[in-house]
Amino acid sequence: MREETKFYLGFDIGGTKIAVCLGRADGTIIASERIPNLERNPREVMNDMVSCGKKLLADASLPPQNISAIGIGAPGPLNIIEGKIESSPNMKNWNDIPIVDFISKEFSAKTYIENDANAGALAEWIFGAGKNCSNLIYLTMSTGIGGGIIAEGKLVRGNDLIGGEMGHIVLDPEGPACNCGLRGCYEAFCGGRAISQKIMADLSQQPEHPLIRFAQGDAGKIGYPVLIEGVKSKNGYALSLWDEICLRNAQAIGIFTNIFNPEFIILGTVALAAGNLLLDPVKKLLPRFAWPQMIKNLKIKTSPLGCKIGEYSALSIAVYYDNNSRAN
């Protein structure tokens, strides 16, 4: 079958919403919708996923048999071999859910599941900033920190297919406790939840602090958005914390650079909002943590896929595994 006649469905599962998209191998998104996932029964959500996917097909006048493959991106931990979502701190009801078998039977199509951060790397490699290169790293920096690695033209998954947990390299064994159970993880220093918790703890006795005012007193809004506003307004506390965040990002990126010697390191989520406020200091600090030979040809960029990264990620899983049967 010619590439231009191949159609794919993608499901990007998040804690609050699920992106459903219909597209082609060249990255053309024909249609997409989003459905809620917050605190709902997984079976009910999966039924909605199927209904939404079939609606997109019907609206495009495509019968289900025209689908070459389906991709599912989901937060870990996953059981890739059995096609299950095992558990997730952000999706409390999703435990040992055989989603691949369910979706595959409903559409009678090959269905593949992948960690959402790995899917982000696939999306950037197939459709985004690293298109056609052989070595790249993608980092998503939102509630936590996830990553995906493309090395020598293949997704790195590891012996048990759970490799690439880049947010959990230990930068300081005496550092802050991480939700994963380790101490001093990259995520514990730079993840969105960790930053929010640190700001709330540090400023708990300062209700009039500018960062609290930026958040309008709402603790739920305290995190990277208000921190970035604080940095832009030259607030001393915000600048000091930002310096630490940039240093830890440079340290982690330096480790990844020396190990994988990538052509691209592509940053999503927080980096999209911060832009050069983050990129410039990280690049300046990077020589402290990586060899000059490794940095010389390295390009550090923000993701060009932006808010559509979920749709492209899910689509890329289907495209990648449909065209690389030995990779799954």
Image (cartoon, helix red, strand yellow):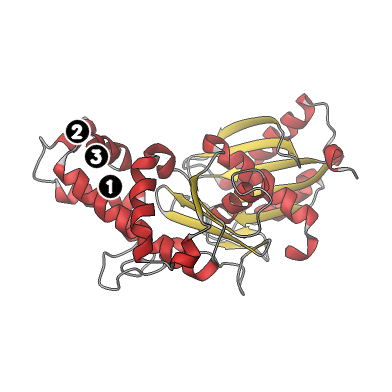
**Horizontal arrangement in the rendering, residue 174 relative to residue 263 (left or right):** left
- The dot on residue 196 is 1
Residue in the foreground of this view, choosing between 160 and 87: 160
Q: Answer with mark 2 or mark 3, whichever residue precedes in sequence.
A: 2
> Mark 2: which amino acid?
Gly
Q: Quadrant of the N terminus?
A: top right
> Mark 3: which amino acid?
Val
Q: Nearer the viewer, mark 2 or mark 3?
A: 3
- The dot on residue 217 is 2
Dividing the picture into quarters, in which one does residue 309 lie?
top right
Q: Answer with mark 2 or mark 1, whichever residue precedes in sequence.
A: 1
Is residue 299 positioned above or below 47 on the image? below
Disc 1: CA contacts within 10 A as few (<14), some (14-19) or many (>=20): many
Disc 2: CA contacts within 10 A as few (<14), some (14-19) or many (>=20): some
Is residue 137 positioned above or below 209 on the image? below
Residue in the foreground of this view, choosing between 100 and 182: 182
> Mark 1: which amino acid?
Ser
Q: CA distance from mark 3 to mark 1?
A: 15 Å
Residue in the foreground of this view, choosing between 63 and 327: 327
CB atoms at circles 2 and 3 under 8 Å apart? no
Disc 3: CA contacts within 10 A as few (<14), some (14-19) or many (>=20): many
SS of the residue at dot 1? helix
Q: Residue at x 68, y 33 (%)?
A: 52
Q: Residue at x 61, y 49 (%)?
A: 130
Q: Which residue is mark 3?
A: 231
Q: Is residue 88 visible?
A: no
Image x and y of residue 109, in percent: 80, 48
Q: Nearer the viewer, mark 3 or mark 1?
A: 3
Q: CA distance from mark 2 to mark 3?
A: 18 Å
Image x and y of residue 245, in percent: 30, 53
SS of the residue at dot 2? loop
The mark tally for this picture is 3
